Image: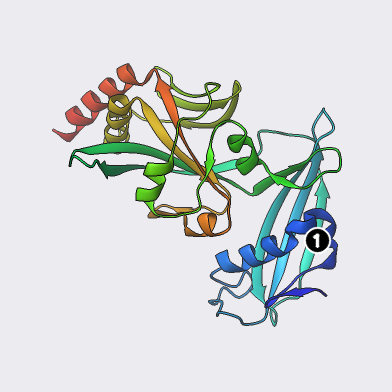
């Protein structure tokens, strides 16, 4: 039973993670707050076990895709577990978790601008391996290959200074009925249905219409909840990617959304 730091894990996991095994084990432990078995809090450095479920499939081009779902528990509650399931190739089974926020940035001249942000990640984490090569995170490697940048700081001011425009083949569109789509090379990476009757949607869309672009924050290990967005772990573990993406089609829908939201508020 291998142990990394205070985390025991199933030795068969090495065959799937390769050189990334130490990073994967320690990241899972750092992100876990409660025991997956008894739900009690996990204390720093106490003996814990890593439980991993891997779903394995192959794309038509022969690329192997693996989804990793992990949990951490007290070692007294359970020893390390590894479960591997083989499934047919289904590229659209991932569940995105997202947050839309507005950041402000002040220029040297003292002017303030509002930056609309779309932050999202996949649950579970999706990795792929081509021709027996190294295992690679899809949500880190794919954006990086299309002009996104790796962010090493969780400070939003630093991110706003660093973020550059993504490649020309990366675009966001908003359809008349409010469906937002983020496309990379024509393939949809993220989609979300916006609602014109929502005041929050209307405010965010107005900011998008004024800016003409969206700061996309993505990658693995983003902690997105109903109450907030935490990117500390993603930045710390080198899985945070950022890029500014132009938006088209947002003007008419943003105006309609604002009008409906104002009418609803009366």
Q: Which residue is drawn at 47% across and 32% down?
A: 192
Q: Is residue 185 visible?
A: yes
Residue 168 rendering spot, x and y as whole percentages: 52, 21
Side (left or right) of 148 relative to 262: right
Side (left or right) of 178 relative to 146: left
Give neighbour class at mark 1: few <14, some 14-19, many 20+ (Cα, 10 Å): some
Q: Which residue is drawn at 59% across and 42% down?
A: 95
Residue 220 rendering spot, x and y as whole percentages: 58, 50
Q: Identify the image quadrant of the N terminus.
A: bottom right
Task: Identify the residue position indicated by label 1 in the image.
Answer: 13
Question: Would you identify the image quadrant in which residue 195 lies?
Answer: top left
Q: Residue at x 70, y 52 (%)?
A: 68
Count of numbered circles in the view: 1
Residue 137 rendering spot, x and y as whole percentages: 67, 45
Residue 143 rendering spot, x and y as whole percentages: 58, 36
- Residue 22 or residue 47, whichever sits in front: 22
**Is label 1 in a helix, a strand or a loop?**
helix
Q: Identify the image quadrant of the C terminus.
A: top left
Side (left or right) of 105 relative to 119: left
- Residue 150 or residue 183, whichever sits in front: 150
- Say if 158 sits above or below 258 in the image: below
Q: Can residue 94 be seen in this view?
A: no
**For the view shown, which residue lies furthest in the front direction?**
108
- Say if 133 sits above or below 260 in the image: below
- Say if 214 sits above or below 75 in the image: above
- Say if 221 sits above or below 122 in the image: below
Q: Residue at x 82, y 61 (%)?
A: 14
Question: Would you identify the image quadrant in which residue 161 lies?
Answer: top left
Task: Name the colour scheme.
Answer: rainbow
């Amino acid at each position: 039973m291998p142990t990394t730091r205070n985390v025991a894990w199933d030795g068969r996991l090495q065959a799937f993670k390769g050189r990334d095994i130490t990073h994967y084990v320690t990241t899972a432990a750092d992100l876990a707050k409660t025991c997956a078995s008894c739900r009690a809090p996990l204390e720093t450095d106490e003996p814990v076990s890593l439980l991993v479920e891997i779903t394995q499939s192959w794309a038509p081009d022969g690329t192997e895709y693996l989804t990793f779902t992990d949990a951490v528990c007290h070692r007294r509650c359970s020893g390390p577990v590894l479960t591997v399931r083989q499934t047919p190739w289904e590229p659209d089974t991932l569940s995105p978790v997202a947050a839309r926020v507005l950041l402000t940035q002040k220029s040297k001249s003292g002017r303030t601008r509002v930056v609309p942000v779309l932050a999202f990640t996949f649950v579970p984490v999706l990795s792929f391996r081509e021709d027996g090569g190294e295992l690679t995170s899809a949500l880190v490697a794919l954006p990086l290959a299309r002009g996104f940048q790796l962010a090493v700081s969780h400070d939003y001011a630093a991110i706003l200074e660093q973020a550059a425009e993504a490649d020309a083949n990366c675009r966001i569109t908003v359809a008349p009925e409010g469906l937002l789509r983020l496309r990379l090379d024509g393939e949809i990476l993220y989609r979300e249905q916006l609602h014109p009757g929502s005041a929050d949607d209307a405010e965010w869309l107005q900011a998008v219409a004024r800016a003409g672009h969206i700061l996309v924050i993505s990658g693995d290990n983003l902690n997105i909840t109903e109450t907030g967005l935490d990117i500390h772990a993603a930045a710390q573990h080198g899985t945070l990617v950022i890029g500014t993406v132009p938006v088209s089609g947002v003007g008419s829908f943003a105006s309609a959304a604002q009008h409906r939201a104002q009418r609803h508020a009366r």
